[in-house]
């Protein structure tokens, strides 16, 4: 293992963990005012089915990637209204005293089924199906959307970059381009969708993601000469380190790096210039100097298109910052959370749907399958039912793969989807299901979704 190889350690946990902060007020005010009104008119406990889905894929992309599920389950465990939260609601008269009393005992006791983290999704895919009383389910809307919209946007971009990079490793380096906690979530989402490492140490600590990094331009500028900076870095990190060679003159930087480290230098990093041209010139110079095994890493505002343009260049690895943590032009996945079915006054189930122009939804409880032809995905098949008696199971679709799993059963999240183990499982699942895409699904150009969404009646 070299100094530049991403380092992975078991996530650290203090001997006694401090209590986690409540996530209950990570929500919009109208979630609670609806509960307030529902308690008054008697509909708060009415059984309901909510659905989280995207009407379209952001940026006319060919597929989406589900990310954030494990984080949502963890936050759901902490979705409790404690003394501080209740005091705020009471002091600011957000809701009535009766609603404050209701929230004091709030626990989500329903069921959540949905797509596994790392799964691909398409327009209309029922990514999450939340079943419970109206009050206990509606209040999860903002939390679920804020997590999945952000993390899936990052994963969408990261997957495209991973496709463009092929077998070359990718490192996420975008922490300084995101809010401090969003940066940690972004590193996690990028890792799930194909990146191999992150520069963010908190992401490494919490989620077990391999971390990497050596020195910035400030290190070279600190010293009187580039050679002094290189010598000092090698003394500290060994010849397997990666030297940043473009602070001054790149050609001179390469010569100095090999003079100081020898031909066993682990790598050089280029962070500026016309990268295809510069990479070719650096590779030729390294080879001439006998450093044929010294790797070249490029950074410098890369996105999926820049990475694809470097496919024929002698580049060994990529570091991506701004583009991946901001969704590469699509900073939100555009998902929504809608009521799709409820129990009527007679005890029967009623499908409900929004009919607004360009913002319509499709009512009914849904079961989702991905049809396959000799291992290649052909469609997103969604069976729609008014109630619960006719829901399709995998047995009804032997040529398809069932997409939904139980994430929360009667209020208890499935711990296997949480923590570092959940991240590893999501990453492995994503790599597996991406192999099902037809070839057209791998293209970076704007187009229709790679798979059609087909609805059938259950």
Image (cartoon, grey):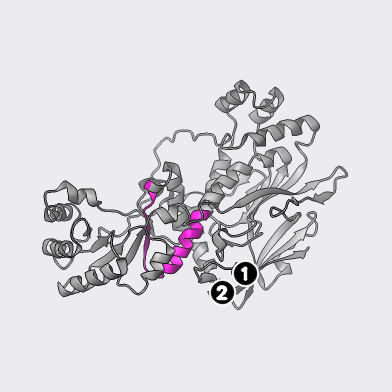
Residue 129 percent location from the top left of the image: 67, 52
Q: Earlier in the sequence, mark 2 or mark 1?
A: 2
162 drawn magenta: yes
Q: CA distance from mark 2 to mark 1?
A: 8 Å
Per the rendered image, the range of residues in magenta is 153-176
**Looking at the figure, which quarter contains the C terminus?**
bottom right
Q: Is residue 119 visible?
A: no
Q: Position of residue 418 (x, y in %)?
A: 52, 49
Element class at badge 1: loop
**Tag 1 residue:** 451
Magenta segment, principal secondary structure?
Answer: helix
Q: Is residue 77 left or right of residue 167?
A: right
Indicate whether residue 313 is drawn in magenta.
no
Q: Residues within 10 Å of mark 1 (few under 14, many from 20)?
A: many
Residue occupied by mark 2: 438
Number of numbered discs visible in the structure rendering:
2
User: Any mark on residue 124, and which?
Assistant: none
């Amino acid at each position: 293992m070299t100094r530049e190889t991403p380092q992975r350690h078991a996530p650290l946990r203090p001997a006694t963990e401090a209590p986690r902060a409540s996530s209950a007020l990570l929500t919009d005010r109208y979630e609670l005012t609806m509960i307030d009104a529902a308690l008054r008119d008697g509909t708060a406990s009415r059984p309901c089915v909510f659905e989280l889905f995207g009407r379209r894929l952001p940026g006319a992309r060919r597929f989406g990637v589900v990310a954030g599920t494990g984080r949502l389950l963890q936050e759901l465990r902490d979705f409790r209204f404690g003394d501080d939260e209740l005091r705020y609601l009471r002091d600011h008269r957000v809701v009535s005293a009766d609603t404050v009393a209701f929230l004091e005992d709030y626990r989500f006791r329903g069921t959540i089924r949905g797509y596994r983290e790392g799964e691909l999704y398409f327009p209309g895919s029922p990514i999450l199906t939340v079943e419970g009383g109206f009050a206990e389910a509606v209040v999860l809307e903002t939390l679920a959307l804020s997590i999945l919209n952000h993390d899936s946007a990052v994963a969408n971009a990261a997957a495209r970059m991973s496709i463009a990079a092929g077998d070359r490793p990718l490192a996420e380096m975008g922490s300084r381009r995101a809010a401090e906690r969003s940066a940690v979530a972004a590193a996690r989402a990028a890792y799930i969708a194909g990146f191999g490492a992150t520069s963010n140490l908190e992401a490494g600590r919490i989620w077990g993601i391999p971390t990497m990094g050596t020195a910035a331009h400030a290190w070279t500028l600190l010293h009187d000469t580039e050679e002094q900076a290189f010598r000092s870095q090698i003394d500290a990190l060994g010849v397997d380190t990666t030297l940043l060679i473009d602070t001054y003159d790149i050609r001179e930087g390469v010569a100095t790096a090999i003079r100081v480290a020898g031909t066993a230098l682990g790598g050089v990093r280029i962070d500026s210039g016309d990268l295809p041209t510069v990479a070719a010139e650096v590779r030729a110079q390294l080879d001439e100097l006998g450093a044929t095994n010294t790797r070249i890493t490029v950074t410098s505002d890369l996105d999926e298109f820049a990475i694809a343009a470097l496919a024929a260049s002698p580049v060994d690895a990529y570091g991506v910052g701004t583009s991946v943590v901001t969704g590469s032009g699509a900073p939100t996945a555009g998902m929504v959370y809608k009521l799709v079915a409820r129990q009527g006054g007679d005890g029967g189930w009623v499908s409900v749907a929004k009919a607004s122009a360009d913002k319509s939804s499709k009512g009914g409880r849904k079961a989702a399958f991905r049809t396959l032809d000799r291992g290649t995905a052909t469609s997103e098949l969604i069976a729609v039912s008014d109630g619960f008696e006719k829901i399709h199971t995998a047995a009804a679709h032997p040529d398809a793969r069932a997409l939904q799993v139980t994430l929360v059963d009667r209020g208890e999240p499935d711990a296997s989807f949480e923590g570092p183990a959940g991240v590893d499982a999501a990453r492995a699942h994503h790599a597996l299901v991406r192999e099902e895409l037809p070839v057209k699904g791998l293209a970076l150009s704007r187009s229709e979704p790679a798979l059609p969404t087909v609805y059938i009646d259950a």
